[in-house]
Amino acid sequence: MIKLLIPLSLFFLISCGSNENNKKADSTEMQTEQTENYVDTMTLRLTDFNREVVCNGRLRAAVKSMLVPRHNDIITSIHVCEGQWVEKGTLLAVTDETNYLREVERTERDLEKTRVDLADKLLQLGYEVDADLNPRSDIPSDILRRAEVTSGYYAAQYQLQTARRNLSDCRLTAPASGRIADLEARLHQRAEKFCNIIDDTSFGVEFHVLEAELPAVSTGHRVRITPFTDDSLTVSGSIVSVNPTVNDKGVIKVTARIPGHRNLVDGMNVRVVVERKVPRMFVVPKDAVVERDGYNVIFLYDHGHARWTYVDIVASNITGHAITGCARKETTLHEGDIVITSGNLNLADDTPVRIKK
Protein backbone atom coordinates (compact mmCIF):
# COMPACT_ATOMS: atom_id res chain seq x y z
CA MET A 1 0.00 0.00 0.00
CA ILE A 2 2.82 2.43 0.90
CA LYS A 3 4.65 1.57 -2.36
CA LEU A 4 1.51 2.52 -4.35
CA LEU A 5 1.13 5.93 -2.67
CA ILE A 6 4.67 7.12 -3.48
CA PRO A 7 4.32 6.94 -7.29
CA LEU A 8 0.93 8.69 -7.10
CA SER A 9 2.49 11.55 -5.11
CA LEU A 10 5.28 11.90 -7.66
CA PHE A 11 2.72 11.97 -10.48
CA PHE A 12 0.81 14.86 -8.88
CA LEU A 13 4.01 16.84 -8.25
CA ILE A 14 5.16 16.39 -11.84
CA SER A 15 1.71 17.28 -13.17
CA CYS A 16 1.49 20.49 -11.11
CA GLY A 17 4.97 21.55 -12.20
CA SER A 18 4.09 21.00 -15.83
CA ASN A 19 0.93 23.14 -15.53
CA GLU A 20 2.87 25.98 -13.95
CA ASN A 21 5.47 25.85 -16.73
CA ASN A 22 2.70 25.92 -19.36
CA LYS A 23 1.11 28.95 -17.69
CA LYS A 24 4.46 30.76 -17.66
CA ALA A 25 4.97 29.96 -21.33
CA ASP A 26 1.47 31.17 -22.23
CA SER A 27 2.04 34.36 -20.23
CA THR A 28 5.33 34.99 -22.01
CA GLU A 29 3.67 34.52 -25.41
CA MET A 30 0.85 36.92 -24.47
CA GLN A 31 3.34 39.55 -23.31
CA THR A 32 5.27 39.14 -26.55
CA GLU A 33 2.08 39.59 -28.59
CA GLN A 34 1.06 42.65 -26.53
CA THR A 35 4.46 44.36 -26.93
CA GLU A 36 4.66 43.87 -30.69
CA ASN A 37 3.97 47.17 -32.57
CA TYR A 38 2.03 46.86 -35.80
CA VAL A 39 2.26 49.86 -38.12
CA ASP A 40 1.18 51.16 -41.52
CA THR A 41 3.79 52.59 -43.87
CA MET A 42 4.20 54.57 -47.06
CA THR A 43 7.14 55.23 -49.39
CA LEU A 44 8.38 58.81 -49.79
CA ARG A 45 8.05 60.22 -53.28
CA LEU A 46 8.50 63.77 -54.58
CA THR A 47 5.10 65.07 -55.66
CA ASP A 48 3.03 68.25 -56.04
CA PHE A 49 1.59 69.53 -52.77
CA ASN A 50 -1.61 71.56 -52.60
CA ARG A 51 -0.78 74.27 -50.09
CA GLU A 52 -3.95 75.60 -48.45
CA VAL A 53 -4.91 78.83 -46.70
CA VAL A 54 -8.20 78.49 -44.81
CA CYS A 55 -10.32 81.60 -44.15
CA ASN A 56 -13.86 82.65 -43.35
CA GLY A 57 -15.68 84.49 -46.13
CA ARG A 58 -19.02 85.84 -47.26
CA LEU A 59 -20.92 85.48 -50.51
CA ARG A 60 -21.92 88.54 -52.53
CA ALA A 61 -24.18 88.30 -55.58
CA ALA A 62 -22.30 89.26 -58.75
CA VAL A 63 -25.06 91.76 -59.64
CA LYS A 64 -27.38 93.34 -57.09
CA SER A 65 -29.74 96.17 -58.04
CA MET A 66 -32.00 98.12 -55.71
CA LEU A 67 -35.26 99.21 -57.33
CA VAL A 68 -36.93 102.43 -56.14
CA PRO A 69 -40.26 103.69 -57.58
CA ARG A 70 -39.69 106.91 -59.51
CA HIS A 71 -42.93 108.35 -58.16
CA ASN A 72 -43.89 108.32 -54.51
CA ASP A 73 -47.41 107.21 -55.35
CA ILE A 74 -49.65 104.37 -54.24
CA ILE A 75 -48.78 101.00 -55.76
CA THR A 76 -51.79 99.73 -57.68
CA SER A 77 -50.43 96.33 -58.77
CA ILE A 78 -47.55 93.97 -57.96
CA HIS A 79 -46.66 91.23 -60.44
CA VAL A 80 -43.82 89.35 -58.70
CA CYS A 81 -42.99 87.64 -55.42
CA GLU A 82 -39.77 87.08 -53.44
CA GLY A 83 -37.46 84.43 -54.85
CA GLN A 84 -38.97 84.65 -58.34
CA TRP A 85 -36.57 84.77 -61.29
CA VAL A 86 -37.33 87.58 -63.77
CA GLU A 87 -35.83 88.54 -67.11
CA LYS A 88 -34.67 92.02 -67.98
CA GLY A 89 -37.64 94.25 -68.84
CA THR A 90 -40.22 92.18 -66.94
CA LEU A 91 -43.04 94.30 -65.47
CA LEU A 92 -42.73 94.18 -61.68
CA ALA A 93 -45.28 96.71 -60.41
CA VAL A 94 -47.38 99.74 -61.36
CA THR A 95 -47.97 102.91 -59.34
CA ASP A 96 -51.08 105.11 -59.66
CA GLU A 97 -51.21 106.49 -63.24
CA THR A 98 -54.27 108.76 -62.93
CA ASN A 99 -52.55 112.17 -62.75
CA TYR A 100 -49.96 111.25 -65.37
CA LEU A 101 -52.60 110.11 -67.86
CA ARG A 102 -54.31 113.48 -67.47
CA GLU A 103 -51.03 115.29 -67.99
CA VAL A 104 -50.39 113.36 -71.21
CA GLU A 105 -53.85 114.24 -72.51
CA ARG A 106 -53.35 117.94 -71.65
CA THR A 107 -49.94 118.21 -73.31
CA GLU A 108 -51.25 116.44 -76.42
CA ARG A 109 -53.96 119.11 -76.73
CA ASP A 110 -51.40 121.87 -76.20
CA LEU A 111 -49.18 120.40 -78.89
CA GLU A 112 -52.04 120.37 -81.39
CA LYS A 113 -52.78 124.05 -80.64
CA THR A 114 -49.15 125.05 -81.15
CA ARG A 115 -49.04 123.14 -84.45
CA VAL A 116 -51.70 125.52 -85.73
CA ASP A 117 -49.73 128.50 -84.42
CA LEU A 118 -46.59 127.15 -86.13
CA ALA A 119 -48.41 126.81 -89.46
CA ASP A 120 -49.65 130.43 -89.18
CA LYS A 121 -46.10 131.64 -88.47
CA LEU A 122 -44.75 129.87 -91.53
CA LEU A 123 -47.53 131.16 -93.79
CA GLN A 124 -46.80 134.70 -92.57
CA LEU A 125 -43.18 134.17 -93.56
CA GLY A 126 -44.23 133.04 -97.05
CA TYR A 127 -43.72 129.30 -96.59
CA GLU A 128 -46.31 126.66 -97.29
CA VAL A 129 -47.57 123.76 -95.12
CA ASP A 130 -49.41 120.61 -96.20
CA ALA A 131 -53.02 119.71 -95.48
CA ASP A 132 -52.10 118.29 -92.09
CA LEU A 133 -50.30 121.52 -91.15
CA ASN A 134 -46.90 119.89 -91.41
CA PRO A 135 -44.07 122.17 -92.65
CA ARG A 136 -42.77 121.44 -96.16
CA SER A 137 -39.32 119.91 -96.48
CA ASP A 138 -37.93 122.87 -98.48
CA ILE A 139 -38.19 125.32 -95.56
CA PRO A 140 -34.69 126.34 -94.38
CA SER A 141 -33.83 124.68 -91.08
CA ASP A 142 -32.96 127.92 -89.28
CA ILE A 143 -36.27 129.53 -90.32
CA LEU A 144 -38.22 126.43 -89.20
CA ARG A 145 -36.39 126.27 -85.88
CA ARG A 146 -37.11 129.93 -85.11
CA ALA A 147 -40.78 129.49 -85.97
CA GLU A 148 -41.07 126.39 -83.71
CA VAL A 149 -39.65 128.35 -80.78
CA THR A 150 -41.70 131.53 -81.23
CA SER A 151 -44.96 129.62 -81.82
CA GLY A 152 -44.49 127.54 -78.65
CA TYR A 153 -44.42 124.32 -80.66
CA TYR A 154 -40.92 123.35 -79.48
CA ALA A 155 -41.84 123.81 -75.81
CA ALA A 156 -45.09 121.85 -76.26
CA GLN A 157 -43.16 118.93 -77.77
CA TYR A 158 -40.81 118.87 -74.78
CA GLN A 159 -43.72 118.98 -72.31
CA LEU A 160 -45.45 116.06 -74.05
CA GLN A 161 -42.24 113.99 -73.97
CA THR A 162 -41.87 114.71 -70.25
CA ALA A 163 -45.50 113.75 -69.56
CA ARG A 164 -45.15 110.49 -71.45
CA ARG A 165 -41.90 109.66 -69.62
CA ASN A 166 -43.58 110.33 -66.26
CA LEU A 167 -46.42 108.02 -67.25
CA SER A 168 -43.95 105.32 -68.33
CA ASP A 169 -42.17 105.66 -64.96
CA CYS A 170 -45.33 104.42 -63.25
CA ARG A 171 -44.46 101.00 -64.63
CA LEU A 172 -41.52 99.49 -62.71
CA THR A 173 -39.56 97.01 -64.84
CA ALA A 174 -36.52 94.82 -64.13
CA PRO A 175 -33.29 96.61 -65.17
CA ALA A 176 -31.50 93.24 -65.43
CA SER A 177 -32.27 89.55 -65.18
CA GLY A 178 -32.18 88.17 -61.65
CA ARG A 179 -34.06 86.97 -58.60
CA ILE A 180 -36.47 89.12 -56.57
CA ALA A 181 -35.19 89.73 -53.02
CA ASP A 182 -36.13 91.97 -50.08
CA LEU A 183 -39.56 92.81 -51.51
CA GLU A 184 -40.67 95.62 -49.19
CA ALA A 185 -43.52 97.17 -51.18
CA ARG A 186 -47.15 96.46 -50.32
CA LEU A 187 -50.23 96.80 -52.50
CA HIS A 188 -52.15 100.11 -52.12
CA GLN A 189 -49.31 101.67 -50.15
CA ARG A 190 -46.47 104.04 -50.96
CA ALA A 191 -42.95 102.58 -50.91
CA GLU A 192 -39.55 104.27 -50.81
CA LYS A 193 -37.97 100.98 -51.95
CA PHE A 194 -39.60 98.25 -53.99
CA CYS A 195 -37.09 95.35 -53.91
CA ASN A 196 -33.60 94.14 -54.82
CA ILE A 197 -32.81 92.11 -57.91
CA ILE A 198 -29.99 89.61 -57.40
CA ASP A 199 -28.22 87.73 -60.16
CA ASP A 200 -27.25 84.53 -58.32
CA THR A 201 -25.88 82.72 -61.37
CA SER A 202 -22.47 83.62 -59.93
CA PHE A 203 -21.13 84.97 -56.64
CA GLY A 204 -18.25 87.04 -55.41
CA VAL A 205 -16.58 85.64 -52.29
CA GLU A 206 -15.03 88.25 -49.99
CA PHE A 207 -12.48 87.10 -47.40
CA HIS A 208 -9.36 88.38 -45.64
CA VAL A 209 -5.87 86.94 -45.27
CA LEU A 210 -3.02 87.84 -42.94
CA GLU A 211 0.03 89.65 -44.25
CA ALA A 212 2.10 86.50 -43.73
CA GLU A 213 -0.29 84.53 -45.97
CA LEU A 214 -0.12 86.98 -48.88
CA PRO A 215 2.62 85.06 -50.78
CA ALA A 216 0.24 82.09 -50.99
CA VAL A 217 -2.59 84.19 -52.47
CA SER A 218 -2.70 85.78 -55.92
CA THR A 219 -5.06 86.34 -58.84
CA GLY A 220 -5.97 83.10 -60.59
CA HIS A 221 -5.35 80.81 -57.62
CA ARG A 222 -8.02 78.15 -57.16
CA VAL A 223 -10.41 78.37 -54.20
CA ARG A 224 -12.96 75.99 -52.70
CA ILE A 225 -15.89 77.24 -50.65
CA THR A 226 -18.10 75.29 -48.27
CA PRO A 227 -21.13 76.76 -46.47
CA PHE A 228 -21.00 76.40 -42.69
CA THR A 229 -24.56 75.07 -42.91
CA ASP A 230 -23.72 72.25 -45.36
CA ASP A 231 -20.32 70.53 -45.14
CA SER A 232 -21.27 68.23 -48.02
CA LEU A 233 -21.40 71.10 -50.55
CA THR A 234 -18.16 72.33 -52.10
CA VAL A 235 -17.99 74.81 -55.00
CA SER A 236 -14.76 75.74 -56.78
CA GLY A 237 -13.72 79.06 -58.28
CA SER A 238 -10.71 81.36 -58.57
CA ILE A 239 -9.36 84.60 -57.11
CA VAL A 240 -10.18 87.66 -59.24
CA SER A 241 -8.69 90.47 -57.15
CA VAL A 242 -6.37 91.16 -54.20
CA ASN A 243 -6.65 94.55 -52.53
CA PRO A 244 -3.15 96.11 -52.43
CA THR A 245 -3.75 97.62 -48.97
CA VAL A 246 -3.40 96.21 -45.46
CA ASN A 247 -6.13 97.49 -43.16
CA ASP A 248 -5.83 98.51 -39.51
CA LYS A 249 -6.34 94.90 -38.41
CA GLY A 250 -3.36 93.72 -40.43
CA VAL A 251 -5.39 91.80 -43.01
CA ILE A 252 -5.84 92.06 -46.77
CA LYS A 253 -9.16 91.82 -48.60
CA VAL A 254 -9.37 89.18 -51.32
CA THR A 255 -12.24 88.53 -53.75
CA ALA A 256 -12.90 85.29 -55.60
CA ARG A 257 -15.58 84.35 -58.13
CA ILE A 258 -17.58 81.10 -58.04
CA PRO A 259 -20.55 79.80 -60.06
CA GLY A 260 -24.01 79.86 -58.53
CA HIS A 261 -25.69 76.92 -56.83
CA ARG A 262 -29.26 76.41 -55.66
CA ASN A 263 -28.08 76.10 -52.04
CA LEU A 264 -26.01 79.30 -52.09
CA VAL A 265 -27.55 82.68 -51.29
CA ASP A 266 -26.34 86.26 -51.11
CA GLY A 267 -24.75 87.10 -47.74
CA MET A 268 -24.09 83.46 -46.75
CA ASN A 269 -21.08 82.77 -44.51
CA VAL A 270 -18.67 80.20 -45.96
CA ARG A 271 -15.32 78.57 -45.33
CA VAL A 272 -12.78 79.45 -48.03
CA VAL A 273 -9.79 77.27 -48.89
CA VAL A 274 -7.17 78.82 -51.18
CA GLU A 275 -5.08 76.26 -53.02
CA ARG A 276 -1.58 76.70 -54.47
CA LYS A 277 0.52 73.89 -55.92
CA VAL A 278 4.03 73.54 -54.51
CA PRO A 279 6.07 71.23 -56.80
CA ARG A 280 8.44 68.42 -55.76
CA MET A 281 7.68 68.02 -52.08
CA PHE A 282 7.72 65.05 -49.71
CA VAL A 283 4.10 64.74 -48.56
CA VAL A 284 2.94 62.63 -45.60
CA PRO A 285 -0.37 62.27 -43.73
CA LYS A 286 -0.70 64.50 -40.68
CA ASP A 287 -0.74 61.45 -38.39
CA ALA A 288 2.74 60.52 -39.58
CA VAL A 289 4.26 63.53 -37.79
CA VAL A 290 4.47 63.54 -33.97
CA GLU A 291 6.12 65.93 -31.54
CA ARG A 292 9.10 64.96 -29.41
CA ASP A 293 11.03 67.40 -27.19
CA GLY A 294 9.66 70.39 -29.06
CA TYR A 295 10.62 69.03 -32.49
CA ASN A 296 8.56 67.48 -35.27
CA VAL A 297 9.47 63.84 -35.76
CA ILE A 298 8.64 61.02 -38.15
CA PHE A 299 9.61 57.36 -37.78
CA LEU A 300 11.27 55.61 -40.70
CA TYR A 301 10.89 51.85 -41.05
CA ASP A 302 14.33 50.19 -41.19
CA HIS A 303 14.54 46.37 -41.24
CA GLY A 304 11.92 45.81 -38.56
CA HIS A 305 12.80 48.85 -36.43
CA ALA A 306 11.46 52.40 -36.13
CA ARG A 307 14.15 55.05 -36.66
CA TRP A 308 13.48 58.44 -35.08
CA THR A 309 13.99 61.26 -37.67
CA TYR A 310 13.60 65.00 -37.13
CA VAL A 311 11.74 66.98 -39.83
CA ASP A 312 10.54 70.51 -40.61
CA ILE A 313 6.98 71.15 -41.79
CA VAL A 314 7.11 73.43 -44.85
CA ALA A 315 3.36 73.69 -45.47
CA SER A 316 0.13 72.01 -44.46
CA ASN A 317 -3.34 71.38 -45.80
CA ILE A 318 -6.40 69.63 -44.41
CA THR A 319 -5.00 66.11 -44.88
CA GLY A 320 -1.22 66.29 -44.82
CA HIS A 321 2.13 68.02 -44.36
CA ALA A 322 4.87 68.87 -46.82
CA ILE A 323 8.11 68.06 -44.99
CA THR A 324 11.87 68.33 -45.33
CA GLY A 325 14.78 67.26 -43.15
CA CYS A 326 15.23 69.31 -39.98
CA ALA A 327 17.65 72.18 -40.55
CA ARG A 328 18.57 72.52 -36.86
CA LYS A 329 19.23 68.80 -36.48
CA GLU A 330 20.82 68.51 -39.93
CA THR A 331 18.69 65.54 -40.95
CA THR A 332 17.78 64.65 -44.53
CA LEU A 333 15.02 62.74 -46.30
CA HIS A 334 15.36 60.68 -49.47
CA GLU A 335 13.03 59.26 -52.07
CA GLY A 336 12.31 55.67 -51.19
CA ASP A 337 12.43 56.17 -47.42
CA ILE A 338 9.65 54.16 -45.76
CA VAL A 339 7.61 56.31 -43.36
CA ILE A 340 5.48 54.88 -40.56
CA THR A 341 2.03 56.49 -40.83
CA SER A 342 0.10 54.82 -37.99
CA GLY A 343 0.83 53.17 -34.66
CA ASN A 344 3.59 55.69 -34.04
CA LEU A 345 2.31 57.58 -31.00
CA ASN A 346 4.16 55.44 -28.44
CA LEU A 347 7.22 54.54 -30.47
CA ALA A 348 10.77 55.33 -29.45
CA ASP A 349 13.96 55.20 -31.48
CA ASP A 350 14.90 51.65 -32.51
CA THR A 351 11.56 50.17 -31.35
CA PRO A 352 10.86 46.81 -33.05
CA VAL A 353 7.82 47.07 -35.36
CA ARG A 354 5.87 44.91 -37.78
CA ILE A 355 4.07 46.12 -40.87
CA LYS A 356 0.35 45.33 -40.93
CA LYS A 357 -0.60 42.86 -43.61
Image: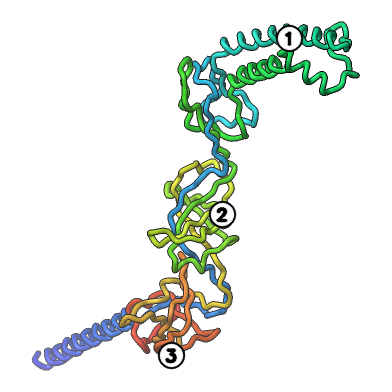
Q: Looking at the image, do the residues carrying marks 1 and 3 touch, with CB atoms under 8 Å apart?
A: no
Position of residue 161 in the picture relative to residue 241 (left or right): right
Q: On screen, 111 above or below 190?
A: above
Q: Earlier in the sequence, mark 2 or mark 3?
A: 2
Residue drawn at x 67%, y 15% is 160
Q: CA distance from mark 1 to mark 3?
A: 99 Å
Density class for disc 1 (Cα within 10 Å; few <14, some 14-19, many ≥20) is: many
Q: On screen, 282 above or below 63?
A: below
User: Percent position (x, y) of residue 240?
Assistant: 58, 56
User: Percent position (x, y) of residue 326?
Assistant: 43, 85
Q: Earlier in the sequence, mark 1 or mark 2?
A: 1
Residue named by callout 2 = 236
Q: Amino acid at mark 3?
A: Glu
Residue drawn at x 80%, y 10% is 121
The numbered dot on residue 352 is none
User: Percent position (x, y) of residue 132?
Assistant: 84, 7
Of labels 1 and 2, the one closer to you:
1
Residue named by callout 3 = 330
Under circle 2, the secondary element is: strand
Q: CA distance from mark 2 to mark 3?
A: 40 Å
User: Relative to the observer, which residue lies in front, 219 or 111?
Assistant: 111
Residue named by callout 1 = 114
Residue drawn at x 34%, y 78% is 291
Q: Amino acid at mark 2?
A: Ser
Q: Earlier in the sequence, mark 1 or mark 3?
A: 1
